Amino acid sequence: NAGVTQTPKFRILKIGQSMTLQCTQDMNHNYMYWYRQDPGMGLKLIYYSVGAGITDKGEVPNGYNVSRSTTEDFPLRLELAAPSQTSVYFCASSYSWNSGNTIYFGEGSWLTVV
Amino acid sequence: ELKVEQNPLFLSMQEGKNYTIYCNYSTTSDRLYWYRQDPGKSLESLFVLLSNGAVKQEGRLMASLDTKARLSTLHITAAVHDLSATYFCAVLNTGNQFYFGTGTSLTVIP
């Protein structure tokens, strides 16, 4: 019953460091997403993927990279971390638009850049 | 780019009262979702609305969708403290991207 699993849950980075947020889902969903949520704000789409080998930019992709080598995994890489990337990051997945399925979220990763 | 606006952003209401949260969106879509988020937690799915005129109810919450007006409402009936949370609406476009509103922070006061 895992659903969407994200790691790590908490991380502190120094400016200029890099890291990867891991995300895996066991629901065989085609679509996967990375969102960021700044304090008191809604979610902004960073990147998304419609299937293995296919990724595309969302609203706020700058400073991030993704890959989708398998259906299950969708890691998010932060290169040269900046304080503006301090946020909560949510990975999510869904089946398909036509099915009307909702989107399932991971527990979130709290990232602080100092 | 699809824009999703919610109002109010903050809502403080007494237990037992009724209120409505509004969600407007900027482009055509017939896929509208409502989520709840408790402080420090992830988002939990509440309702999935898939057609014009769709209405869903669960307990004290009822959601509706008017695709012609590009408007969804989340109505709260006889609020209780357990409903205190932040509520988000989200619209799904044909590219399967979910766009979220800014959220409505609801506090129910005893």
Image: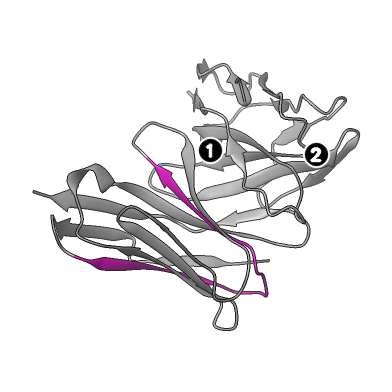
In the rendered structure, which segment of residues is drawn in magenta?
A: B18-37
Q: x, y percentage for residue B94?
A: 77, 62
* Position above or below: A68 against B27: above
Direction from residue A99 to residue B81 in the image, left or right: left
Which amino acid, by three-letter code, is at mark 2? Asn
- Which class describes the residues within 10 Å of circle 1: few (<14), some (14-19), or many (20+)? few
Quarter of the rendering containing residue B57: bottom left
**Label disc, if present, on residue A109 of the rendered structure:** none
| Residue for point 48% across, 40% down | B43
Residue A86 can be seen, yes or no? no
Q: x, y percentage for residue A17?
A: 63, 18
For marks 2 and 1, give the one nearer the viewer: 2
Most prominent secondary structure in the magenta stretch?
Answer: strand
The residue that label 1 is drawn on is A84
Q: x, y percentage for residue A113?
A: 51, 25
| Residue for point 88% across, 33% down | A52
- For the N terminus of chain A, the quadrant is top right
| Residue for point 52% across, 29% down | A108
The way the protein has been coloured in the rendering is one colour
Asked if the stretch drawn in magenta spans residue B19, the answer is: yes
Asked if the stretch drawn in magenta spans residue A110, the answer is: no
The residue that label 2 is drawn on is A30
Subunit under mark 1: A
Task: In the displayed orientation, state which residue is furthest to the bottom.
Answer: B68
Q: Nearer the viewer, residue A9 or B81?
A: B81
Direction from residue A34 to residue A69 in the image, left or right: right
Q: x, y percentage for residue A45?
A: 64, 47
| Residue for point 18% across, 45% down | B81
Label located before the other in sequence (2 or 1): 2
Which amino acid, by three-letter code, is at mark 1? Ser
